[in-house]
Image (cartoon, rainbow, N blue to C red):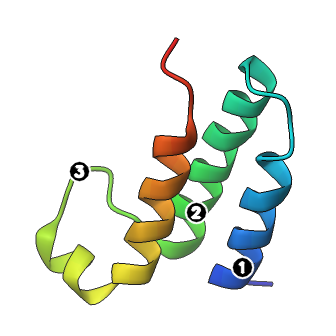
C-alpha cells in the first residue's frame, strides 16, 4: 500500500505530540526516510523535481525543520 500525503501528515501530527527531545527527533528522522522512500524525494536538491512536487517537498521540509537542533 502506497502512503498518501494525507497519511504522512497524520503521522507527522502524531509524532509532534511527543515531548521535544531525542525520541521525537528520531521519529521525525524516520518519517523523513519514509517520505523519501514513498515519494521518491531525491537525495540532493533538485529544482525540477521540487517544481513538479511542491506539496511533497513542502511536507518533507516541514518535517525536517521540526527537528531540534541539538
Q: Residue 59 appears at what percent x and percent y?
A: 50, 67
Marks 1 & 2, CB-CB < 8 Å contact: yes
The residue sitting at 51% across, 74% down in the picture is 39
Task: Look at the numbered disc 1 and give the secondary structure of its residue.
Answer: loop
Mark earlier in primary sequence (1, 2): 1
13 in relation to 28, above or below: below
Task: Look at the numbered disc 3 and give the secondary structure of its residue.
Answer: loop
Separation of disc 1 and disc 2 at Cα? 8 Å
Nearest to the observer: residue 63 or residue 31: 63
Q: Which residue is mark 1?
A: 3
Marks 3 & 2, CB-CB < 8 Å contact: no
44 in relation to 58, above or below: above
The residue sitting at 48% across, 45% down in the picture is 64
The residue sitting at 86% across, 37% down in the picture is 18
Task: Look at the numbered disc 2 and give the secondary structure of its residue.
Answer: helix
Mark earlier in primary sequence (3, 2): 2
The residue sitting at 49% across, 56% down in the picture is 62
Nearest to the observer: residue 11 or residue 20: 20
Separation of disc 3 and disc 1 at Cα? 22 Å
21 in relation to 43, above or below: above
In the rendered structure, find residue 44 and report the number of the disc placed on it: 3
Q: Residue 61 appears at what percent x and percent y?
A: 42, 55
Separation of disc 3 and disc 2 at Cα? 15 Å
Marks 3 & 1, CB-CB < 8 Å contact: no
Q: Residue 37 appears at what percent x and percent y?
A: 56, 62
Dot 2 surroundings within 10 Å: few (below 14), some, or many (20 or more)?
Answer: many
For this view, does 62 lie left or right of residue 8? left
Q: Which residue is mark 2?
A: 35
Amino acid at each position: 500500500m502506497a502512503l498518501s500525503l494525507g497519511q504522512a501528515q497524520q503521522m507527522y501530527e502524531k509524532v509532534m505530540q511527543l515531548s521535544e527531545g531525542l525520541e521525537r527527533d528520531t521519529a521525525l528522522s524516520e518519517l523523513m526516510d519514509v517520505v523519501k522512500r514513498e515519494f521518491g524525494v531525491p537525495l540532493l536538491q533538485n529544482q525540477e523535481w521540487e517544481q513538479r512536487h511542491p506539496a511533497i517537498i513542502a511536507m518533507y521540509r516541514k518535517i525536517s525543520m521540526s527537528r531540534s537542533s541539538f
